[in-house]
């Protein structure tokens, strides 16, 4: 008996067993266009992201946490597949009627977790296309979609809040759709008197600045034309509370199995139209009011974990899908009221850019009782959740799947001495030929077109001429101000070659 006890104690105390897989719930909160410097725990000083800061204080705050693209669709594609988006055509920002981009049969993170016995759901913004080659058939069963690639349940804003239609997708159907009033997406203006942001500009509750001047819904004109589906339409102001309510109900519904919740917040993407109770609550207009709304969502989700008694059984990851932008097409005062706020923190560039601000974004992990709180400088990326979570729960990745995802679990859990990525490719959107490439302290920037977008986040969106290659020392120069290409030719050459191996060689320059 005594011997048996010794054996049991020996096993319990052995590192191998301590490292044995555990199956916590997993909540991935992905914000939309949230910048590194938008959190008060990362330098924002004119308003407080109290709930997110608390999450950071209770877990690990990564100063070199990244998403892999500086637009939404490619980052989300990589999060779910573990594959860099530049490898697959058609993964740039999805238009309103885009068909499903991740097709059934492609190994996905939710699919992996589902296969391991997890309940899986995505709630919030999707923007990865829906339906077959013709795009979503809004008035019918919509497939393929999230349900066909590993999610048991979805409750979604189908594209983005600035793209039509403004309806919820629940599993395979538009919620509350009246068959007598079907949704019709039109390629062009459907009738002479159809209200658009161009001809009814004076009636809008928020004006547009570029694009976004087609069908008006809820006093805001959008990208794309549609009619019908009146009963199914949402009010932008109500989205956040709906995501929270649906998420909490879903988490609570089944307590027997672990769950994976992908909470895909829509803030602070345009049109920024937070609930009335957040409007005017921050000093920089609706953009930062929306960030306060996001912060509230995080607080509500964390409160639900506490109430359900599962905070110690739940790994929470907070990240963003790309860096910040001020005027992304609506006159919401983001630039005019910006003051000294630096949404990208100390970094250059933002959304649409391969400078650090485009992809170096908020990244936090929390697992109460397991993760020792702290700050980490290790490089981790949203694409790594696939391999790292597989490693956490002890399941193998199918051969050939998630080929760009790295197991950085130790780093994500903040374990001392555990390393993050050794190299990371940053892309902007689609096949622009613009890349960032970080290896340790070095950052190579390659712009095949010689032009970069949103280099100065604190100005109106602009395209700036830039050299084809640049090299920066991120340790000494996190703001990418001093090009060392000439002074460090060997580092530059090595990195150019390695980047070419990963993304393909730069095309011959025209002209
Ligand atoms: C751009 C939109 C921008 C935003 C972006 C996608 C215009 C002029 N601009 O084309 O407002 O919707 O696409 O953002 O239409 S993302 O975060 O979903 O990638
Ligand atoms: Ca985004």
Image (cartoon, grey):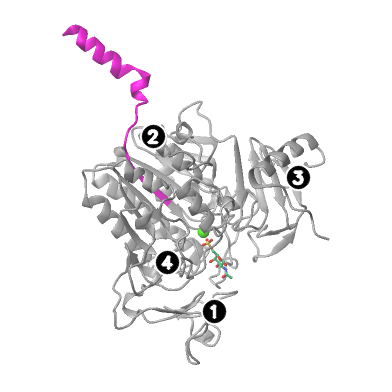
C-alpha gap between disc 2 and disc 3: 40 Å
Camera-near label (1 vs 2) is 2
Quadrant of the image containing the C terminus: bottom right
C-alpha gap between disc 4 and disc 2: 36 Å
Say few, some or many: other residues with alpha carbon within 10 Å of mark 3 (under 14 / 14 to 19 / 20 or more): some
Residue at the spot of label 4: 274
**Reading the chain from its start, which is encountered first: label 4 or label 2?**
4
Numbered disc 1: secondary structure = loop
Residue at the spot of label 2: 392
Camera-near label (1 vs 3) is 1
Quadrant of the image containing the N terminus: top left
Could you say which is closer to the camera, residue 229 or residue 203?
229
**Reading the chain from its start, which is encountered first: label 1 or label 2?**
1
Q: In the drawing, does residue 160 fall left or right of residue 232?
A: right
Could you say which is closer to the camera, residue 6 or residue 144?
144
Residue at the spot of label 3: 482
Expressed as whole percent of the image width and height from the top left, the position of residue 305 reads 29, 46
C-alpha gap between disc 1 and disc 3: 40 Å
Numbered disc 3: secondary structure = loop
């Amino acid at each position: 008996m005594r011997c048996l006890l010794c054996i049991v104690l020996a096993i319990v105390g052995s590192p191998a067993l301590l490292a044995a897989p555990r199956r916590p719930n997993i909540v991935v909160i992905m914000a939309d266009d949230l910048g590194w410097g938008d959190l008060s725990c990362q330098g924002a000083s004119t308003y407080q992201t109290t709930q997110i800061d608390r999450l950071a204080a209770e877990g690990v705050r990564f100063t070199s946490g990244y998403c892999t693209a500086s637009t939404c669709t490619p980052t989300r594609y990589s999060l779910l597949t573990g594959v860099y988006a530049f490898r697959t055509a058609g993964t740039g920002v999805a238009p309103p009627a885009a068909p499903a981009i991740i097709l059934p049969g492609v190994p996905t993170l939710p699919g992996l977790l589902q296969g391991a016995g997890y309940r899986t759901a995505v709630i919030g913004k999707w923007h990865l296309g829906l339906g077959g080659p013709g795009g979503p058939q809004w008035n019918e069963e919509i497939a393929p979609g999230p349900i066909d690639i590993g999610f048991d349940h979805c409750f979604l804003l189908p594209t983005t809040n600035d793209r039509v239609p403004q309806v919820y997708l629940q599993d395979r159907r538009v919620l509350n759709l009246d068959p007598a009033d079907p949704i019709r997406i039109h390629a062009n203006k459907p009738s002479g008197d159809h209200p658009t942001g161009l001809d009814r500009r004076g009636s809008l509750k928020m004006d547009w600045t570029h694009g976004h001047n087609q069908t008006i819904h809820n006093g805001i004109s959008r990208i794309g034309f549609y009619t019908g589906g009146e009963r199914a339409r949402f009010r932008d102001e109500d989205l956040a509370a709906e995501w929270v309510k649906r998420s909490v109900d879903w988490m609570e519904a089944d307590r027997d199995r672990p769950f994976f919740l992908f909470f895909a917040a829509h803030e602070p993407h345009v049109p920024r139209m937070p609930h009335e109770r957040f409007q005017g609550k921050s000093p920089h207009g609706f953009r930062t009011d929306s960030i306060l709304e996001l912060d509230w969502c995080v607080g509500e989700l964390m409160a639900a974990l506490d109430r359900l008694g599962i905070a110690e059984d739940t790994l929470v990851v907070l990240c963003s899908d790309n860096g910040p932008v001020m005027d992304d097409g609506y006159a919401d005062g983001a630039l005019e009221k910006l003051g000294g706020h630096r949404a990208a923190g100390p970094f250059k560039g933002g959304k649409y850019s391969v400078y650090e601000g485009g992809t170096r974004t908020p990244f936090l992990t929390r697992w109460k009782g397991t993760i020792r709180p702290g700050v980490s400088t290790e490089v981790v990326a949203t694409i790594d959740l696939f391999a790292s979570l597989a490693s956490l729960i002890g399941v193998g990745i199918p051969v050939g799947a998630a080929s760009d995802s790295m197991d950085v679990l130790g780093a994500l859990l903040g374990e001392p001495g555990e390393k993050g990525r050794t190299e990371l490719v940053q892309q902007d959107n689609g096949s622009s030929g613009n890349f960032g490439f970080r290896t340790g302290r070095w950052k190579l920037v390659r712009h095949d077109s010689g032009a970069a977008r949103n280099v100065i986040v604190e100005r109106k969106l602009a395209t700036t001429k830039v050299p084809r290659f640049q090299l920066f020392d991120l340790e000494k120069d996190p703001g990418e101000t001093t090009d060392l290409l000439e002074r460090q030719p060997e580092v530059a050459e090595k990195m150019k070659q390695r980047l070419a191996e990963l993304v393909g060689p730069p095309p011959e320059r025209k002209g």
